[in-house]
Image: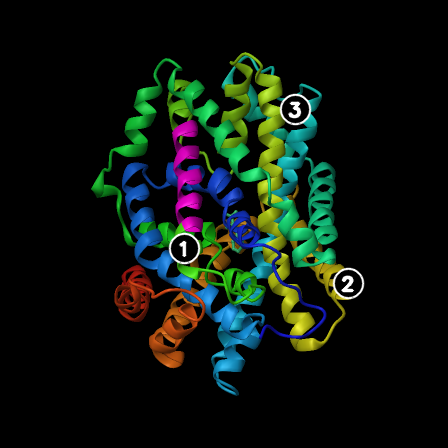
Amino acid sequence: MPNANNNRGLWVSRMGFVLAASGSAVGLGNVWKFPYITGQNGGGAFVLVYLACIFAVGLPIMLAEFTLGRKTSLNPVGAFNALKPRSAWVGTGVMGVLAGFLILSFYGVVGGWTLAYVAKSLSAGVTHFDSPRQAGEFFGSFIANSGEIIFYHLIFMGVCVAIVIKGVNNGIEKACDILMPTLVVILLILMIRALTLPGAWEGVRFYLYPDFDKITPQVVLIAMGQAFFSLSLGMGAMLTYGSYLPARENLTAATVYVVLFDTLIALLMGMVIFPAVFAMGLEPAEGPSLVFSVLPAVFSQMPWGGAASVVFFILLSIAAVTSGISLLEVVVAYFVDERGWPRKKAVLVLGGVIFALGVPSGLSFGAWSEFKLMGMTFFDLVDNVASNYLLPVGGMLTAVFVGWVWGAGEAQKEIERHETRFHYAAIWAFLIRYVAPVAVAAVFIAKIF
Ligand code: PHE
């Protein structure tokens, strides 16, 4: 039986769970981060390494997280504790909660940029650029404006808090229902526009033609971190969502669906951005501002561009919120389950703390842009620590735990509890016991030497 604690809830429908998990996975990671780090790390070769990480490492770990969550009906800390009481394994859960704090702090900032671009599209402020440079400069001066950045970051966090306060089945599930198909449609329209710009094929070539010389241990580390980030893995977000599952859900089907959908959105987004970048003579390695300077330039050059921009940034905001709430939910579930906090108090206090932690990230492109730690701005540092280290290490520990400590056989029993046989159990066990942990460890070792 799922946990009887009244502060918890259950997903109402089966589709609700799949949509909510996709809502967590699909977000700024696909639309904003994937294009810019692909641009910084060499294009096609990076995409190939990324895909390998998604299918060999991400997919098996997602199933492991769903299974741990449904088995225990608990938050990440509670789940490890329940299956291996009083052991150091709770550390994996603690790391996850910490990663949730860190990621949401800068995620909220970028979520705020997206909300701001909804407002700016409505007033036609970002769809009438004469040149792509102008669009880039406009974005540059926007993110340097501390007051505006913090204001929108606050709004973004406020929306996440308001939804998470209502709890999983009322807030999160409903919020995810309509978005996904609409997002695909608008991306397809944008892709057609981008591909028909003169010079677009140079971008397709950059994006799809792998130049293997560009693969270094650092590039592989970033690709792997991005796979974890994009699939919401390695910090217990999918574990927490799995904990609200009734036993009848088919975990394997849900995993495959979420992974394919998330990957599709990221790949489509690349097909929008790179053709446009090359057609407009922009620089693919520009960094976090890439999408926000390229897209408004594309919108400025298309019929109905103003309307398309409004719709696009609204959808992206919703996608960002549905990911943001899953990050907040991990942190909240821990304080509710393990510390006995009332849900409302947990959401308000933790939302406030995360907002405050995000302020220095928000200032990293303006007032604090000169302040560097280990050569990185505060924003880049938090992202780098969380995405490239905490998530892969958390994912590796989860794989070892499920594969060896709890045991792939026990996990298989949980997967098969209410469904027909899991036909790929042997392959999955091999991936979770050997491939996933060894791959992550190998990347870290290669990076060190
Ligand atoms: N997967 C989300 C995205 O791509 C971000 C996220 C990371 C959400 C980790 C939850 C946990 O935007």
Residue at position x 73%, y 61% from top?
A: 347
Residue type pointed to by label 3: Ser
Asked if one can make out residue 55 in the rendered structure from this viewpoint, the answer is yes
**Between marks 2 and 1 in the image, the one whose residue lies nearer the viewer:** 1
Disc with the residue nearer the chain's start (1 vs 3) = 3
Tell me the tag on residue 121. 3
Judge whether 267 appears above or below 433 on screen: above
What residue does disc 2 label?
344
Residue 386: x and y in percent read 50, 58
Residue type pointed to by label 1: Ala
Residue type pointed to by label 2: Lys
Residue at position x 51%, y 49% from top?
A: 22
Q: Check disc 3 and report its element: helix, strand or loop.
A: helix
* Residue, far bottom: 86
Asked if ligand 1 lies within 8 A of label 2, the reply is: no
Mark pair 2, 3: CA separation: 34 Å
Whether label 2 touches label 3, CB < 8 Å:
no
Which of these two is toward me, 433 or 283?
433
Range shown magenta:
257-273
What residue does disc 1 label?
253
